[in-house]
Image (tube, rainbow, N blue to C red):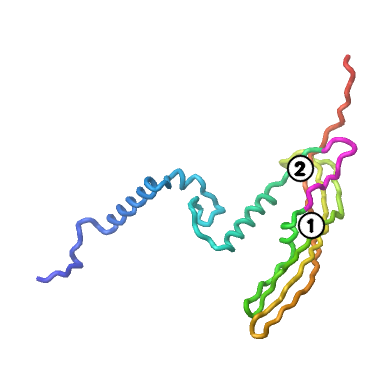
């Protein structure tokens, strides 16, 4: 009786052979290539795309979003508590104006368009930062911070830039529009309350 060759199979089931092959590749990859288990698992981070520490190609938009998330975490999720400033002639409380990147992120965004039919760019950006207000609240107790003063810092940021519009098809043209945007930013922070002034008492 004729029997097809496809019915002839080894005694070991297919899933067992696949399991053995996968285990062998895992052992070779983690022991002979320099990527040991300790190296793979030591830098697991939720900010990575795959969660692993080895290199993985990502899109530029994903890289920009990850960098913005890390900068936001460093800037917003960590509230600094400054030390008190002793003395009657202490400097101004607001000594940390917003950076240009913080101001630029607050400017309304625009759609880039669809090149070559229509495209938009912003060039020659100039930013002027002015402090318009400063206020220090009286000392009170804040949870997880203790006795502190809340310092209010108000800034007016004026952004000058040139917005360029152009098209290459079907009718080539370009136009430059000089624009001004005004952004108001508040940078509040806590400052510890200072104790009573120390008075040198003469020795007894």
Predominant SS of the magenta segment: loop
- Residue 141 horizontal/vertical position (percent): 78, 40
Residue at x 48% of width, y 52% of height:
54
Q: Is residue 36 above or below residue 159?
A: above
As drawn, the residue found furthest toward the top would be 204
Residue positioned 73% across, 42% down in the render? 143
Is 172 on the left-hand or right-hand side of 2?
right
Q: Residue 126 appears in which quarter of the rendering?
A: bottom right
Disc sitting over residue 185 in the figure: 1
Q: Position of residue 35 (x, y in %)?
A: 43, 47
180 magenta-colored: no
Q: Give left or right: position of 22 versus 5.
A: right
Q: Secondary structure at mark 2?
A: strand
Quadrant the C terminus occupies: top right
Residue 124 sits above or below residue 39 on the image:
below
Q: Residues within 10 Å of mark 2 (few under 14, many from 20)?
A: few
Q: Which residue is mark 2?
A: 142
Magenta stretch, residue numbers? 85-97
In the image, residue 36 above or below residue 61: above
Magenta stretch: includes residue 95 = yes
**Mark 2 to mark 1 CA distance (whole Å):** 23 Å
Q: Position of residue 66 (x, y in %)?
A: 60, 57
- Image mark count: 2
């Amino acid at each position: 009786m004729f029997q097809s060759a496809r019915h002839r199979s080894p005694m070991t089931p297919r899933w067992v052979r696949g399991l053995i092959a996968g285990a062998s590749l895992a052992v070779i990859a983690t022991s002979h290539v320099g990527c040991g288990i300790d190296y793979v698992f030591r830098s697991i981070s939720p900010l990575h795309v795959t969660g692993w520490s080895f290199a993985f190609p990502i899109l530029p938009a994903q890289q920009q979003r990850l960098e913005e998330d890390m900068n936001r975490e460093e800037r917003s999720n960590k509230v600094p508590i400054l030390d008190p400033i002793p003395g009657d002639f202490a400097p101004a409380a607001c000594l940390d104006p917003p950076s240009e990147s913080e101001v630029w992120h607050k400017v309304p965004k625009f759609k880039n368009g669809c090149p070559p039919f229509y495209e938009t760019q912003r060039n020659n950006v100039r930013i002027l930062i002015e402090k318009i207000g400063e206020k220090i609240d009286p000392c009170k107790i804040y949870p997880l911070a203790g006795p502190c003063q809340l310092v209010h810092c108000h800034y007016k940021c004026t952004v000058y830039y040139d917005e360029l519009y152009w098209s290459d098809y079907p009718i080539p043209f370009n136009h430059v529009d000089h624009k001004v945007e005004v952004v108001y930013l508040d940078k509040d922070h806590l400052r510890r309350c200072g104790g009573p002034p120390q008075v040198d008492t003469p020795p007894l």
